Image (cartoon, helix red, strand yellow):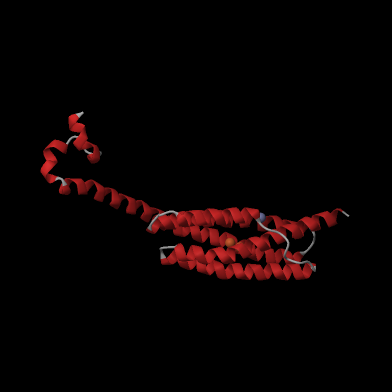
Amino acid sequence: MPNEALRELYVDELRDLYNAENQLVKALPKLAKAANSDELRTAFEDHLEETKGQVARLEEIFKMLDESPKGKKCAGMEGLVKEGSEVMEEDFEGEVMDAALIGAAQRVEHYEIAGYGTVRTFAEILGESEQVSLLEETLEEEKAADEKLTEIANNVNWEALNEDETEDEEVEDEPVSQSSSKRGAASSTGGKPAKRKNGRAA
Ligand code: FE
Ligand code: ZN
Ligand code: FE
């Protein structure tokens, strides 16, 4: 029966998603904690609640199939979560950290969208219409989560840019006020104050 092989693949992919979602239940609170803006933190917290519902939906499907949800580790999600952890270890601040977190989170959403699109199609082919509806609900949540992150990114990225400009201005101002007594000698050499002292002898 060719259906049997496809059903096996379907169950296998569902197990992969089940493991992926459970990895996210652990990872999303960390992302929320690392977020600087209230808007982003709330988005992560809301999606955590949705993710728990997605786990429950998958469990419902496994019950219908009379199969165990366990037995697979999602290596793709493991890698994406690891990249998220790497982002959190960087010393990005404020809106720049938020922009980095959004970048990591959107990779996760796109990965899930691909995964749920696949199993939704398998369920259709196998004639499991109830499972199609459940998987589509999750698929829509993942798409909405991705769009929400894009919306937040539109604000955050511009603020991150402004943050950078403010810092640049401060850097330019400092040497002038701090080394005003040497202003005459330094005026045309700006940019490498550390080398200036030795530079004279050379
Ligand atoms: Fe999910
Ligand atoms: Zn996977
Ligand atoms: Fe998601």
Q: Residue at x 77, y 70 (%)?
A: 64
Q: Residue at x 76, y 60 (%)?
A: 11
Q: Quadrant of residue 123?
A: bottom right
Q: Position of residue 48 (x, y in %)?
A: 55, 68
| Ligand 3 location (quadrant) | bottom right
Q: Is residue 3 above or below residue 33?
A: above
Q: Is residue 97 left or right of residue 114?
A: left
Q: Is residue 187 left or right of residue 78?
A: left
Q: Position of residue 25 (x, y in %)?
A: 58, 66
Q: Going by the picture, which residue comes out furthest to the right?
A: 1
Q: Residue at x 21, y 34 (%)?
A: 198
**In front here: 12 or 4?**
12
Q: Residue at x 39, y 57 (%)?
A: 95
**In front here: 149 or 34?**
34
Q: Position of residue 20 (x, y in %)?
A: 64, 60
Q: Going by the picture, which residue comes out furthest to the top?
A: 202
Q: Position of residue 87 (x, y in %)?
A: 48, 54
